[in-house]
Image (cartoon, grey):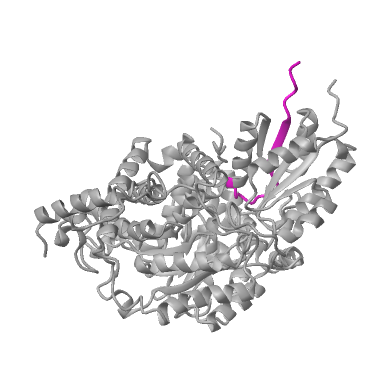
Amino acid sequence: MYDSKKLAEEREKWLAHSAGWQERKEEFKSDAGIPLKSLYTPLDVQDIDYLGEIGFPGMPPYARGVYPSMYRGRLWTIRMFSGFGTPEETNERWKMLYQEGETGFSAAVDSLTFAGVDPDDPVDWLEVEVGKEGVPLYSIRGVEVMVDGLPIDKMSVALVVEPLTSTAVTSMYFNVARKRGISMDNLRGTTQNDILTMTIGYVPWRSLKPDDLLKLACDLIEFCTARGEAPKWNPINFTTYNYREGGIDAVQEIALGMANAVAHIEEMLSRGWKVDDFVFRFAFHLAAHRNFFEEVAKYRAARKLWYRLMKERYKPEDPLSYQFRFHVQTAGSSLTAQQPMVNIIRTAYQALEASLGGCQSLHTNSFDEAVCLPGEESVRLAVRTQQLLQEETGIADVIDPLGGSYYVEALTEELEHRIWEYFEKIESEGGIVEALKSGWLYREMGKAFERRRRAVESGEEAVIGVNRYVVEEEPHPPFRTNPRAAEIEVERLTKLRAERDNQKVEKLKDELRRVCEKRENVMPVLMELTREGASTGEVTNIYREMWGLWDVPIMA
Amino acid sequence: MEQKKIRVLLFKPGIDGHWRGIVTIAGALTEAGMEVIFAGFKSVEVIVDSAIDEDVDVIGYSVHSGAQHAWTCKLKQVLEEKGVRDSFLIIVGGAIPLVDHETLKKEGADGVFSPGTNTADVVSFIRENLPKSPIIAD
């Protein structure tokens, strides 16, 4: 215990004493611009009510974690985002990762799967991107091969597809699971299904309008969760990681995630559902970035803010709806092509942030990812980075070990204020969908690009190997994807189109057109349509045909 | 005498949507006094036609999909078909392995920029290497 009056006096004395000591910089700030003191003491946290604002893990306001036992009960899931070449090669990599100790799967798809275009689409030359950025999932056959021989009845699978194609690809996966005799009641996994990933994280090619993307995202939530067709499936994963990578800060990251979730809640409520019918399955996917303590505080603040948002605005009955569950990915944008081995160290610190922050699952980047997809050696090291944290360091033995740090608690509180403020700013722009349509979000991203460029080029933001400690070096040989991938995938699709019952497929495609016109839920007909062999591109082209395209206001 | 501004046409070939790099470059080149036209996603054929119509000096594109070789070869092929290869300075940036620079130069890129590039280097590269036989506008 301490006497706060006495402590304040002593602190004044210490400040006077330290004033004569020079500091390295005129001012110290966190990455999000929060001014930092040189030292935090009990005085900085004296207004924080422990029981009301920090509390216990698994209990409101969840600052210390969403589960009562956290990692003492179960360690976070080691989930490596992975996919390339063909479904066969991806399956081989997934098997290797499984053998190396990965505990969850995550499918990185290629740009065609992401955009909902088939490799035999008449648009010129798209085949050069087949299998380059991820696994091509153009039909149920590709999905089936990807998970062949893997224990998807026991291990969860994340499908990293966004609302343009999340409904089609998820329905393919559900059909594969059914075919393998796995009960939909027990099927575990996640569809990323994040409208912001495919609008501001990554600019979509021939995209639908934001309202239509939101509709599709909510169709999946409605089908899986509200209607209970896949009760253990997370139908959405608000992936703030992907916009954080553009250079926005931790405050903007979490605020965007909350505002995005609100847009989906409102859409679901307008469809007549209650919050308790679906919010308990909402999940998030956050970044682990460069500023160590700010990132740890960010995870703690995010949990508290989600609790506050639910409590103040939606008042669900189910305690699960108040729990902010999240996956973390270490920051790809922090990696350098120069001196790539340094990336191992960056990633290790970022993984430590995520685990000290109480993540539910984690992807660690491989050291070569600034320039290519990970090779075997580098991805194995990335898995080992997590295993080392879990099994050698002892950091998983005590819950929220940084809780109670004067600094971390003060930072958590300050972040909460700032995040809520930015969240309100987004709401004053009309919410996520309006802010997309007006171009406001694109301008916010553009400002972030610019700010980061200036910071790095001026040297204000240190990037080892780029703006300091530069050396002459032999470039690391990059991992290359299969050059024959396009040929293989076109052949797979041609064969499927020849073998399927095309009359039935055409009839179901007409049914999908009718459903789109009436704006009914697309999932029931997709479950039939993709089972019968319709491709990702065929489904997405029907959306385009029925709803029209969006002129993305990038430079507005 | 007022000097003509350097004109740059930037685009994303293919459908990969990683946009931070190309928009960052657009900002930096504008700041350096160049006139930048950002065309977004475009086919190589359309880009070459616009480059001719707009009388630009530089064509730049950004690739994060790993398809940098394919797009560079394709651009060179279309430029040669139209007989305008020497009319433009061609620059490519993105998630490009450092070992690819020489190959990409053989495939048709004049300047190749990998992650970690300072935009000032792109600016000076453009200024020092402007095309020798620009298209003369009518």
Q: Is residue A422 left or right of residue A439?
A: left
- Is residue B15 magenta-colored? yes
Instruction: Out of A460 and A550, give the one closest to the viewer.
Output: A460
The quarter holding residue A60 reads bottom left
Indicate the position of residue A411 as horizontal and vertical percent values: 30, 54
Classified by dominant secondary structure, the portion drawn in magenta counts as loop
Judge from the rendering whether residue A57 lies leftward or rightward of residue B67; answer left or right: left
Q: Position of residue A508 (x, y in %)?
A: 57, 58
Which residue is outermost to the top?
B1
Q: Is residue B8 left or right of residue A421?
A: right
Question: Quick check: A125 above or below A56?
Answer: above
In the image, residue A29 lies at what x, y percent?
38, 48
Residue A301 visible to an observer of this rendering: yes
Q: Is residue A532 left or right of residue A351?
A: right
Which quadrant of the figure has residue A431? Answer: top left
Relative to residue B137, is residue A480 depicted above or below?
Answer: below
What's the residue at 78%, 50% (across, down)?
Answer: B72
Q: Nearer the viewer, residue A477 or A510?
A: A477
- Residue at position x 39%, y 44% from top? A26
Membership of B127 in magenta stretch: no
Q: Nearer the viewer, residue B114 or A546?
A: B114
Q: Quadrant of the N terminus of chain A?
A: bottom left
Q: Could you tell me residue A4's position as x and y percent? A: 11, 55
Q: Which residues are magenta?
A: B1-20
